[in-house]
Image (cartoon, grey):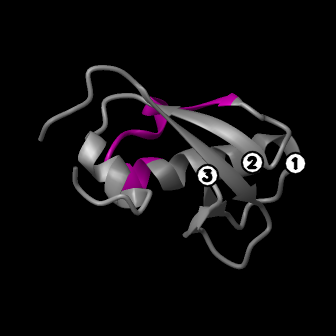
Amino acid sequence: MPVSEGPIEIRIKAVPGASRDALGGMLGDRLKVRVSAPPEGGKANKAIAALLARELGVRPTQVEIIAGHTSPEKTVRVAGCDPERVRALLGGGPG
């Protein structure tokens, strides 16, 4: 499986307290990420990292929130993932 040369950054819109963990597609230039965890104590951020890791086929430790820790609008850095998988996740398809 090809991996990226460097980390990939993904802008997301977090929706904590949802009924289930799921990706909600694109919302403007951000990927909507719904998690059931509450926004207190970093629980939602951990759930977001776990969900993105599962969807991208990487370990949760390879997913890091680099901006927006206390905001619904976040920037996430993902290391060691397949760029094609990220494009598919964001709805861009291959190429």
Q: What amino acid is labelled 3 in the image?
A: Asp
Magenta segment boundaries in residue numbering: 53-66
Q: Say the numbered circle drawn on residue 9.
A: none
The residue to which callout 3 is attached is 29
- Tell me, for residue 43, which label it has, or none: 2
Relative placement, left or right, of 18 versus 78 is right
The residue drawn where x is 31% and y is 30% is 80
> Amino acid under label 1?
Glu
Q: At label 2, which amino acid type do we have?
A: Lys
Q: Quadrant of residue 38?
A: bottom right
Q: CA distance from mark 1 to mark 2?
A: 6 Å
Q: Residues within 10 Å of mark 2 (few under 14, many from 20)?
A: some
Q: On the picture, is 4 further left or further right than 44?
A: left
**How would you rate the neighbour count of disc 3 (Cα within 10 Å): few for under 14, some for 14-19, many for 20 or more?**
few
Q: Mark 3 or mark 2: which is in front? A: 3
Instruction: Return the residue found at the far top.
Output: 6
Q: In the rendered image of this protein, does residue 65 appear above or below residue 20?
A: above
Check whether the beta carbons of the residues at disc 1 and disc 2 lie within 8 A of each other.
Answer: yes
N-terminal-most mark, 1 or 3: 3
- Whole-angstrom CA distance, mark 3 to mark 2, is 24 Å
Q: How far across and down, in percent of the image, does residue 65 sit? A: 63, 33
Q: How far apart are labels 1 and 3 at the CA level?
A: 26 Å
Q: In front: 55, or 8?
A: 8
Q: Tell me, yes or no, whether the highlighted magenta stretch contains residue 50.
A: no
Mark 3 and mark 2 lie on one chain; the one further toward the N terminus is 3
Find residue 76 and report its image quarter.
Answer: top right
Q: Quadrant of the N terminus?
A: top left
Secondary structure state at the residue bearing disc 1 = helix
CB contact under 8 Å: marks 3 and 2: no
Q: Is residue 16 above or below residue 44?
A: below
Magenta-span inclusion, residue 64 = yes
Residue 40, numbered circle: 1
